[in-house]
Amino acid sequence: MDNDNQIRQRIQKLVIMSGLTKPKFAERIGFNKANFNLILTGKRKVPESLVFAIVSNKMATFEYIVDGTEEDDRTSKRFSDISNSGGGAVTINNGNSEKQSQRADAITNKMLDMLSKGIDNIMSMQLRLEKHDKTESSDMDAIRQRLDERNKLADRFLTMLDEKDRQLEAANEQIRRLTELLSHKEKGQE
């Protein structure tokens, strides 16, 4: 049985231990449900991204998925596997084959790359948001200024309308008086 099948079995065990269905488990760790099912049935190789998703969602430790070491077993293994070789150099013997070590290193490197890209994306998003906030702030200031100008113009327009209204009322009053005078004059001539 190769390491990929062992990892697949550990993931299946995690699904069972979680009490979730395969699709619910995939959803919980943020993994594509169809791909997750293909991986568990052995039709696809276990990708590093799946291991990363499980570890980042704290469903299991990296060591458990890759090496199969349990929590208690892992602690004692950590101390027993570190040995001091002759000249004071420390070597770590993880007890795995070279292929398993390379796979674990590849997964670790992939996880670090994904984290690095995630941090880079977050930083660029933050810069864009800061730039957008500055632009938005200046845009909002310009909009407020234009609204103030329009409000002032509207106030002036309303004042002018009121003045014209008064002038029209005065003109109407003059016309009414003239009409009255004319009607009195006509009555007086008759």
Image (tube, rainbow, N blue to C red):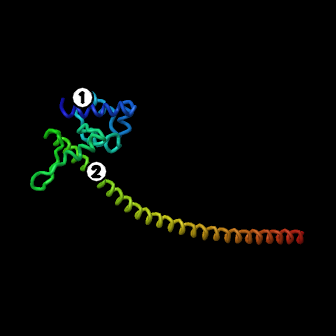
Q: Nearer the viewer, residue 42 or 97?
A: 97
Side (left or right) of 28 relative to 168? left
Q: Is residue 12 above or below residue 61?
A: above
Measured as percent of width and height from the top left, residue 53 is found at 31, 42
Tell me the tag on residue 95: none
First of labels 2, 1 by sequence position: 1
Secondary structure, mark 1, is: loop
Q: Could you tell me which residue is drawn at 15 percent across and 52 percent down?
A: 90
Quadrant hosting residue 165 = bottom right
Q: Is residue 73 above or below residue 23?
A: below
Which quadrant, please, contains the C terminus?
bottom right
Residue ranking furthest to the left: 87
Q: Which residue is mark 1?
A: 42
Q: Is residue 161 above or below residue 18?
A: below
Side (left or right) of 20 relative to 2? right
Q: Which residue is mark 2?
A: 115
Measured as percent of width and height from the top left, residue 167 is found at 70, 71
CA gap, disc 2 to disc 1?
27 Å
Side (left or right) of 98 relative to 46? left
Quadrant hosting residue 180 = bottom right
Secondary structure, mark 2, is: helix
Disc 2 marks which amino acid?
A: Leu
Q: Could you tell me which residue is drawn at 16 percent across and 49 percent down?
A: 83
